[in-house]
Image (cartoon, grey):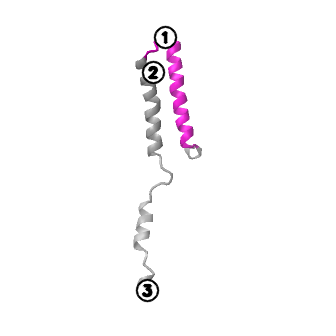
């Protein structure tokens, strides 16, 4: 399910969700001041930045792949 989604789509969805929550809080009567704006910016930027830094392209090698590469005889030793 999550294999067909890109990093940019996840980051965009997260930012959209934070903006919708901000809009709903304004509709509910929350005041807009500098502290609230800073909090919303940090809530939007920090998880997105961590997601972009951590998300890797290829999965790490499995134990079976590592053992297979170590136990493979070299071509030079068969002369």
| Residue 13 tag number | none
The answer to whether the residues at label 1 and label 3 have Cβ atoms under 8 Å apart is: no
The range drawn in magenta is: 5-33
Task: Pick out the residue farthest to the front.
Answer: 34
Task: Pick out the residue farthest to the bottom.
Answer: 79
Q: Is residue 65 magenta?
A: no
In primary-sequence order, the first of circles 2 and 1 is: 1
Please name the residue shown 44% across and 60% down the image: 62
Picture coordinates of residue 54 (x, y %)? 44, 45
Residue holding disc 1 = 29
The CA span between labels 2 and 1 is 15 Å
Q: Is residue 43 above or below residue 73?
A: above
Q: Nearer the viewer, mark 3 or mark 2?
A: 2
Magenta stretch prevailing secondary structure:
helix
Q: Is residue 3 above or below residue 14?
A: below
Q: Is residue 31 magenta?
A: yes
Quadrant where the image shows the C terminus: bottom left
Please name the residue shown 50% across and 12% down the image: 28
- Disc 1 secondary structure class: loop
Count neighbours of disc 2 (C-alpha within 10 A) and say few if under 14, some if 14 to 19, many if 20 or more: few
Between residue 41 and residue 28, name the one nearer to us: 41
In primary-sequence order, the first of circles 3 and 2 is: 2
- Disc 2 secondary structure class: helix
Q: Is residue 6 above or below residue 62?
A: above
Picture coordinates of residue 2 (x, y %)? 55, 43
Residue holding disc 2 = 37
The CA span between labels 3 and 2 is 69 Å
Residue holding disc 3 = 78
Picture coordinates of residue 20 (x, y %)? 54, 23
């Amino acid at each position: 399910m999550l294999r067909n989604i890109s990093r940019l789509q996840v980051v965009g969805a997260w930012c959209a969700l934070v903006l919708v929550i901000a809009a709903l809080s304004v509709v509910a009567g929350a005041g807009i001041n500098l502290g609230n704006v800073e909090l919303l910016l940090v809530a939007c930027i920090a998880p997105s930045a961590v997601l972009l830094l951590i998300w890797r392209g290829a999965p790490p090698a499995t134990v079976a792949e590592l053992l297979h590469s170590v136990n493979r005889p070299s071509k030079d030793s068969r002369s």
